[in-house]
């Protein structure tokens, strides 16, 4: 009974989103066409349902990899976030992906992948782990809003990872860091100094933390596990290096 209500609610949400946006699709395409004709060389696109439907998870991953090459090469797309574009996207959203990132101020999620308005759902928590709320957010992004790629992104010099290694105890940070501890357990085979001062060890733990988060997503979300098994979504990890701006993908 309860499942039935949830299923109906999801269907209603989907229908509402589609209905709200259908009238905007042609308008968005028309506006962009006019702008292109007026000589805008690098404008943002706006995701529409037909564009979302036409993309596969692998194509989106490739798009994100190429976007990161543009970002790290200081060649990001000039984006149009003017009022007319903002007006169009009020009708609905058809994102390509969901990125789960750390909160670090030095990591600009959309920019790192050279993505624009309406392209990405972003979840952020220090140490990019998942809990029930984040899992619900990712399920919403994929099952309801149609995102086809999940990227779990960790980064170089992560304070949360370093604090977990140092076993910091401070207010609510203590219980938050407990979510990262499994990655430290996974990293005991590291050869070398296992401390937060050793950048290689911090990176090793960060990468294991990304892998652990991906395992948690698959283990704790029936919806996402099923979508992945059916090839409807892809779940990948990525490690971001601050100096280079480059991502190392963990497929
Ligand atoms: Zn961090």
Image (cartoon, rainbow, N blue to C red):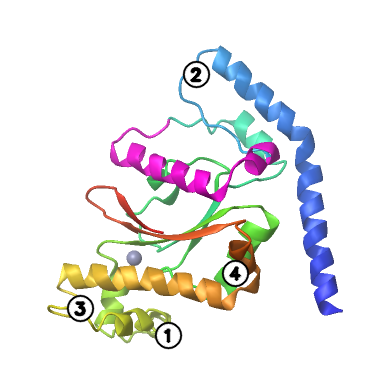
Quarter, ligand 1 = bottom left
Residue depth check, mark 4 versus mark 1: number of the one nearer the observer: 4
Residue at image location 81% in from the left, 44% down from the top = 19
Residue under the image location 61 percent in, 24 percent down: 32
Rounded to the nearest angstrom, the CA distance separating label 1 from label 2 is 49 Å
* The CB of the residue at mark 1 lies under 8 Å from ligand 1: no
- Comparing marks 4 and 2, which lies closer to the viewer? 4
Left or right: 5 as drawn, with respect to 106: right
Magenta span: 49-77
The C terminus sits in image quarter: bottom left
Q: CA distance from mark 4 to mark 2?
A: 41 Å
Q: Quadrant of residue 35?
A: top right
Labels 3 and 1: the sequence-earlier one = 1
Classify mark 3: helix, strand or loop. Answer: loop
Q: Nearer the viewer, mark 2 or mark 3?
A: 3
Magenta span: chief secondary structure = helix
Residue 200 screen position, x and y as percent? 18, 68
Residue matched to label 2: 40
Badges 3 and 4: C-beta atoms under 8 Å apart?
no
Q: Are marks 2 and 3 in contact (CB under 8 Å)?
A: no
């Amino acid at each position: 009974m309860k499942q039935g209500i949830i299923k109906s609610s999801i269907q209603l949400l989907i229908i509402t989103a589609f209905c709200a946006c259908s009238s905007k699709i042609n308008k968005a395409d028309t506006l962009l066409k006019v702008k292109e004709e007026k000589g805008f060389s690098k404008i943002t696109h706006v995701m529409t349902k037909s564009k979302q439907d036409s993309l596969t998870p692998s194509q989106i991953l490739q798009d994100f990899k190429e976007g990161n090459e543009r970002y790290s090469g200081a060649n990001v797309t000039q984006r149009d976030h003017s009022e007319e574009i903002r007006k169009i996207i009020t009708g609905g959203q058809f994102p390509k992906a969901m990125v789960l990132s750390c909160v670090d101020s030095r990591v600009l999620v959309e920019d790192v992948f050279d993505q624009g308005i309406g392209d990405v759902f972003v979840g952020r928590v220090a140490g990019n782990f998942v809990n029930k709320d984040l899992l619900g957010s990712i399920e919403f992004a994929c099952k309801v809003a149609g995102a086809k790629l999940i990227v779990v992104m960790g980064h170089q010099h992560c304070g949360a990872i370093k604090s977990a290694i140092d076993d910091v105890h401070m207010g609510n940070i203590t219980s938050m860091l407990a979510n990262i501890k499994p990655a430290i357990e996974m990293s005991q085979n590291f050869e070398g100094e296992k401390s937060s001062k050793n950048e290689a060890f911090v990176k090793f733990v960060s990468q294991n933390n990304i892998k652990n988060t991906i395992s948690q997503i698959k283990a704790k979300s029936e919806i996402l596990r099923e979508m992945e098994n059916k090839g409807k979504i892809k779940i990948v990890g990525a490690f971001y290096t601050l100096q280079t701006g480059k991502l190392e993908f963990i497929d």
